[in-house]
Image: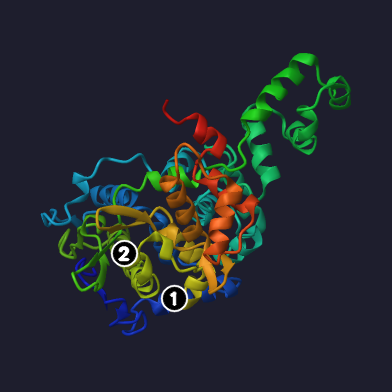
Amino acid sequence: MPSPSSGTKTSGGSISARTSASPDPFRPMTLKLRAGQRQTSRLGLTPAMRQSLELLRLGAADLDAVVEREAAENPFLLRLPPDGDPQVGNIENFAAPEPGLTERLLRQLRLQSLAHDVMAAAVFLAGELREDGYLDTPLEEVAETLGIDLPTAEAALAALQSCEPPGIGARDLAECLRLQLADAGLEPALAASVVALLDQFAAPGREALAGRLGLSEPEMRRIAALVPTLRARPVEPESQAMQIVVPDLHVTRDASGRLEVSLHAAAVPRISLDEGALGSMRSGEIDALRASARSLCRAIRYRGMTLLRIGRLLIETQAPFFLAGPQSLVPMTRAAAAERLGLHPSTFGRAISAKAILFEGRHIPLSTFFGSSLGSGGGAVSSRAVQFRIRAMVEREDRASPLADAEIVAHLRREGVDISRRTVAKYRQWMRIPSSYARRRARPG
């Protein structure tokens, strides 16, 4: 296993070791995964590859739960006692979080009587979900990647979409709304009709609409009451971020500004392969347990090395964020980061899902560092950096005369950020900052 203390350093904002400075022991696996996703009509993902991807998606607490369960069932896995390092603590010292989204979905899938290949595909799909619960990966690509036929992939998606929260696994907004209505008891055909005519349910004079759909007045009232409860996203990404209790990476800096990144010791499962378990006994079942233990240890190591490579990339590219503050966040998309690391975009998405960095007492979700960018006089600026600037402006504003969105636009344009009032309003709403009118009314006195 990689040592939790091993890491990469920067000095005064300059880099002393680049992400490609040493051979990546997992580069062959990464390339194999990418090739598998292009050539799986011949190969498909092996069980070991699937396990690596499944564990990569899990947050530290969910990973620890999986390791605990596997160690209890496999005599070749030995859980080691915590190292007791008072600087970083152990996972038991952190407040127990609610299970993450992936773990909650896996628990629900296990309760379904699914064929083995359907279950494996459903677990894979759960790992492909975006943070908001949508699925972007085409089923045809999933079928090719896993070496299964399309009906099996469709059955897996149906199993996933039957889980909570309603709407999970939707591929677009209309499907998300249909799934929520079906969960509320509407027949699929009626749910599709309601979504197609959604705006008319909010308009007066629903009698004609009831006749058109063949619904009674009580049925219309029930649907009209359901419509305002529908959500545009199955999962709120903010709630996902709040569930990250145990950080996976630890970034520190010394007095000279030198940055170092390492795996957070509390997030690295302390587990060992006990090859001597059961002595020299041999049987098909024992050999399978031994192979399973080896596979789990390799998957954990792959997960740790992948996260450490992402951490190295961050202190290389985001030194201004760590040294000067969030407003200095450098724009970088997930696709660009994945390309720099030689990872498939979906693999990279799994790696940063439900993960956080510990930096000077703060937990920073990895997703914070990857987003869109806006034009500025000096090139490009991260959309998240602009959001940080907006929040800072609001925190410093005169409470008696809060800044209107147009004034925030003017401030940002003076700083060289080309942004519209509509975009400012959208960012403000995302950050749950009330309008200037509401902030003025909320002022004490």
Which quadrant, please, contains the C terminus?
A: top left
Residue at the spot 48% in from the left edge and 71% down from the top edge = 338
* 354 w.r.t. 195: above or below: below
Residue at the spot 15% in from the left edge and 56% down from the top edge = 80
Whether residue 53 is visible to the viewer of this picture, yes or no, is: no
Q: Nearer the viewer, residue 339 or 55?
A: 339
Q: What residue does disc 2 label?
A: 291
Q: What residue does disc 1 label?
A: 341
- Where residue 243 appears, x then y in whole percent? 37, 44
Figure quadrant of residue 55: bottom left
Query: Closer to the observer: label 2 or label 1?
Result: 1
In this figure, what is the number of numbered marks? 2
- Give how far apart the Cα atoms at labels 2 and 1 are: 29 Å
- Where residue 260 appears, x then y in whole percent? 25, 71
Which quadrant, please, contains the N terminus?
A: bottom left
Comes first in the chain, label 2 or label 1: 2
- From the viewer's perspective, is 190 left or right of 298? right
Figure quadrant of residue 57: bottom left
Q: Hey, what amino acid is under mark 1? A: Leu
